[in-house]
Amino acid sequence: MYSIKDTNFAGRKVLLRVDFNVPTDDQGRITDDTRMRESLPTLQKLLADGAAVIIMAHFGRPKKGGFEPELTLAPVAKHLERLIGRPVAFTQELLGDKVRQMAAGLKGGEAMLLENIRFYPGETKGDVALAEQLSKLGDCYVNDAFGAAHREHSSTAVIARFFPKDKYFGFLMEHEVKNLERLMHDAPRPFTAIIGGSKVSSKIGILENLMDKVDNMIIIGGMRYTFTKAMGGHIGKSICEDDKMPLALDLMRRMEQKGVRYYLPTDSVVADAFSNEAHTQVVPSDQVPDGWESMDCGPDSVRAISDIIRQSKAILWNGPAGVFEMPAFARGTHEIAKAVAEACKDGACAAVGGGDSVAAVKQMGLADQMSYVSTGGGAMLEYLEGKTLPGIAAIKD
Ligand code: ADP
Ligand code: MG
């Protein structure tokens, strides 16, 4: 019912929301079109059915309210033509007679891209009048913009109320929602979460929500030093949020009460500077010498973490184990990625999410070996915090 799979859209005028917010260089050239390619199956299915497809997308963060030449979707429209091998109607004019005429004249199998939807000041406010005007361009709504699903904007959520019986998830959204729902409500056991990254403060909601769901919690990355210092360990100048130490103790106490087994790495790769060329040594994680800082987890920890991963049937990973951007400190993250990939080969179900974690897994060439790599950074993290995502709720309501 929410899926486009079983519906034939022949003769329909579909409003399709996608996430085409691609990175560009200073000349405005697209440097990575992954996000566009991820929604192609949805677009191609609609066009192949014989639908006329009016695509809505945002680009960057317009501030002025109205057209801004450097944030036009014109290059995206051109690139989309190459990807789908057919013309894409496009105008830089905003919603008005011209856009309405173009949309009305669009025939089955034809696509049109609206100019950057965030040029309308109402979009990010979830303006109902804007949503209504947009809704009049088509006769049904398909949302495939998982990357924007945590936003209650006119084109990502509010517009759905004008299509109470004609609103759908695109293939990308459906894939994300299915995988996340399975993991959060019906995960095979044992279920292990691996949570890392630089700051505890950005992962509190995730730790709190997941401790009710998992059997094992592995806490890695820079954020684990707040836990270690809170327990009285020496962390040198490793990254730490002193004001979060009481919270760290509380989180550990609550995990114990709930019977969640938590694991903190026992050894660390430390450096005498935050640099790829720094001197390094491996030390117990709670005995970092003064003047040194932790950059990665050590070999004993990698082995212990890999063992836990190997025994798990469901794995959720968010947050790198070390400063993986520097090759000298990428090993922990790399080894964990390999262990997760191995577990997937043995039938475990593993999800990887978060902007940096996904970048790490891709950089290591292991993304295709994971059962599921989320395309939505912020959206996935909010889902893991247990929040309702407006873009999902709007289709399901
Ligand atoms: P994600 O985007 O996957 O949610 P985060 O943004 O939470 O991940 O964390 C990623 C960052 O954490 C990376 O830039 C990485 O360099 C940093 N990081 C990991 N381990 C450490 C550490 N020991 N010290 C400092 N920073 C770290
Ligand atoms: Mg990040």
Image (cartoon, helix red, strand yellow):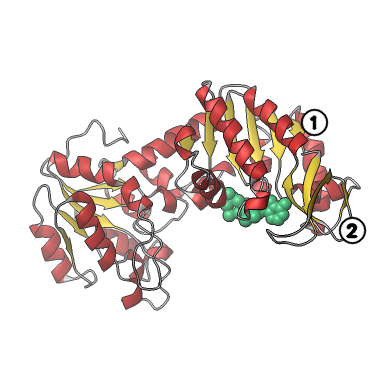
Mark seen at residue 87: none
Question: Which type of secondary structure does the marked residue at label 1 adopt?
Answer: helix
> What residue lies at 42% left-to-right and 44% top-to-bottom?
392
Name the amino acid, label 1: Gln
Mark seen at residue 257: 1
Can you say whether 307 is above or below 392 in the image? above
Residue 201, can we see it?
Answer: no
Task: Name which quarter of the figure residue 238 lies in.
Answer: bottom right
Query: Residue 12, percent across and down?
Result: 14, 45
Residue 145, can we see it?
Answer: yes
> What residue lies at 62% left-to-right and 46% top-to-bottom?
319
Q: How many marks?
A: 2
Query: Residue 293, percent across and down?
Result: 79, 56
Name the amino acid, label 2: Asp
> In the image, is 313 to the left or to the right of 49?
right
Can you say whether 323 is above or below 116 in the image? above
Query: Which residue position is annotated with label 2?
Result: 290
How packed is label 1: few (under 14 Cα within 10 Å), some, or many (20 or more)? few
Question: Which type of secondary structure does the marked residue at label 2 adopt?
Answer: loop
> What residue lies at 65% left-to-right and 44% top-to-bottom?
331
- Foreground residue, 62 or 34? 34
Image quarter (top left, top right, bottom left or bottom right) of the C terminus = top left
Q: Could you tell me how far apart the alpha carbons at marks 2 and 1 are, in whole angstroms? A: 34 Å
- Foreground residue, 261 or 291? 291
> In the image, is 238 to the left or to the right of 151?
right
Can you say whether 241 is above or below 362 in the image? below
How packed is label 2: few (under 14 Cα within 10 Å), some, or many (20 or more)? few
Query: Residue 194, percent across and down?
Result: 65, 38
Q: Is mark 1 within 8 Å of ligand 1?
A: no
